[in-house]
Image: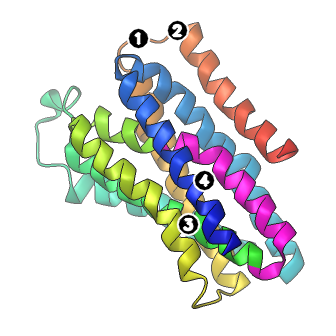
Amino acid sequence: MQAIILTIFTFFSTLLGGLFAVKFKDKLHLIMGFTAGVLLGVVSFDIFPEIINQIKENHFSSTEVMIALVIGFLLFHVLEKFLVIHHLHEGDYADHRHPQVGILSALALAGHSFMDGVGIGLGFQVNPAVGLLVAIAVISHDFTDGMNTVALMLINNNTPRKSKMFLVLDAVTPVLGALSTLFFKVSSHFLVLYLGFFAGFLLYIGASDILPEAHSKQSSAKLIGLTVLGVVFIFLITRFI
């Protein structure tokens, strides 16, 4: 029950982040710059260290994890380029936006949020202290998860109403993830492969979608600074929270 109660805080944290992005959608390029830094920070200072620890402790194959990362990167690339983008002449492509890409990205982030809830639940299966630490980390970065979900929807020409619908989905999934851990346990091997896969996905949307979109109109020192700030923000959270 402690895990379920704490995931309710992740619900509100995600909602607040998403509503922030909706309110300041006229400054979306700045939010996107910050978001790109957040994703890079999550991969570098949260996911990769956990992968390394799991490999050392359980003697897993690092090659398998990197294969999972490449699959995560390429799978989203293939889905984006061949399944959701309709055929266009190259000359018409630059300024075109695709709502399906935003929906696909938002669904993938909702899947990540579900696994955040799973992480909290599994942490409490170890002991309450571990569960509490995991929950604090998840609550802290779910604000930016909400921002990411809304931003990815809006930059791909989805309506604010639809963006809010997917924001609610993203906010609910951690609670569902925590509930699911009442019925199963996952192996460490599966967990580390999932982490590699999701790292690949985050690297793709950060480098291929979010960062180019942030700079599509105009680059500035402020925008670059916000990207750096996003990285530093996650670094501080992972080190001190």
Element type where label 3 sits in the image: helix
> What is the C-alpha distance between the residues marked 4 and 1?
36 Å
Residue at 37% x, 20% y is 216
> What is the C-alpha distance between the residues marked 2 and 4?
35 Å
Residue 127 place in picture, x, y as percent: 84, 77
| Residue 16 to residue 132: above or below | above
Q: Amino acid at mark 4?
A: Phe
Contact (CB < 8 A) between labels 2 and 4?
Answer: no
> What is the C-alpha distance between the residues marked 1 and 3?
32 Å
Tag 1 or tag 4, which sits nearer the N-term? 4
Q: Which residue is mark 3?
A: 197
Answer yes or no: is residue 67 visible: no
Element type where label 4 sits in the image: helix
Q: Which residue is mark 4?
A: 9
51 and 112: which one is in front? 112
Nearer to us: label 2 or label 4: 4
Contact (CB < 8 A) between labels 2 and 1?
Answer: yes
Task: Say which quarter of the image contains residue 107.
Answer: bottom left
Q: Residues within 10 Å of mark 2 (few under 14, many from 20)?
A: few
Nearer to us: label 3 or label 4: 4
Answer yes or no: is residue 173 visible: yes
Residue at 74% x, 31% y is 232
Q: Quadrant of the N terminus?
A: bottom right
Q: Which residue is mark 2?
A: 220
Tag 2 or tag 3, which sits nearer the N-term? 3
State yes or no: residue 145 in magenta: yes
Q: Which residue is mark 1?
A: 218
Q: Which residues are magenta?
A: 125-146
Residue at 65% x, 61% y is 6
Q: Amino acid at mark 1?
A: Gln
